[in-house]
Each structure stands twice: as C-alpha cells, then as structure tokens.
Image (spheres, rainbow, N blue to C red):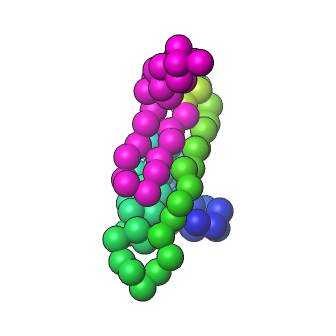
Amino acid sequence: MKVETITNEANNYRSDFGCDIPLKELSKRTANYMHAYTLYSAVRPFGATIMLGTWTEAHGPEVFQMNKLNLIFDHESLELQLQLYLNKI
C-alpha cells in the first residue's frame, strides 16, 4: 500500500466533510482497502501490518494497527499484545 493511497483517503474525507479525518475512520478505510486486495486473486495481497498514529488536543495520543484480515487494534489492544509477548520470553 502506498502512502499516497492513505493520503488520498484523508484528502477525500476533507473535501467531502470539510474537516480532518479521525484516525479511527482512516484506519477503517485503510483496513478495508487492504482486505479487498487480499480477497481478489487478480491483485497481489498485502503481507504487512500498518500502524498509524496521531495526537490531538481532544483525544491525546492514538495508535491503530491494521492488517490484511481487516482487523484493527487500538493502542490498548497493542499494549496487551506486547505484555503477553513479553511474558512468553
């Protein structure tokens, strides 16, 4: 996935709604795009995970991780995954 694709999604949202796209919405759109590429054999599926982060006055820091299975994890889920991983070591 190119950075331009994510940027275009953010720009389209701004032109449609007149404000910046919330990170959660951008994460959903990105995950849907990745999942669509995974479903069809005519295009090469994604084999990577993407993480997006931001900081706003209203919400503070936010981090979302998305993968090709259309799963989206927020920062709390990522912290739990890290703790589970570190406990295995």
Q: How many marks?
A: 0
Q: Is residue 24 left or right of residue 6?
A: left
Q: Judge from the rendering whether residue 41 lies leftward or rightward of residue 83; answer left or right.
A: left
Question: Which residue corresponds to the image point at 54% horizontal and 50% vertical from the top-left?
Answer: 49
Q: Residue 33: horizontal and vertical position, in percent?
A: 43, 65
Q: Nearer the viewer, residue 14 or 1?
A: 1
Residue 20, x across and y down, in percent: 53, 49
Of all residues shown, which one is farthest toward the top? 87
Is residue 4 visible in the rendered image? The answer is yes
Q: Position of residue 89 (x, y in %)?
A: 59, 18
Q: Which quarter of the figure has residue 72?
A: top left
Residue at horizontal 53 percent and vertical 60 percent from the top = 47
Q: Quadrant of residue 38?
A: bottom left
The one nearer the camera, 51 or 48, is 48
Q: Which residues are magenta?
A: 63-89
* Frontmost residue, 28 versus 1: 1
Looking at the image, which residue sits at the far front?
Answer: 89
Taking the image as drawn, is residue 17 in sight?
no
Name of the residue lying farthest toward the right = 3
Q: Quadrant of the N terminus?
A: bottom right
Image point 42% across, 85% down: which residue? 42
What is the residue that sits farthest to the bottom in this orientation?
A: 42
Residue 37, relative to residue 74: is it above or below?
below
Q: Position of residue 57 (x, y in %)?
A: 58, 25
* Residue 5 falls left or right of residue 74: right
Q: What residue is drawn where x is 51% and y is 64%? A: 46
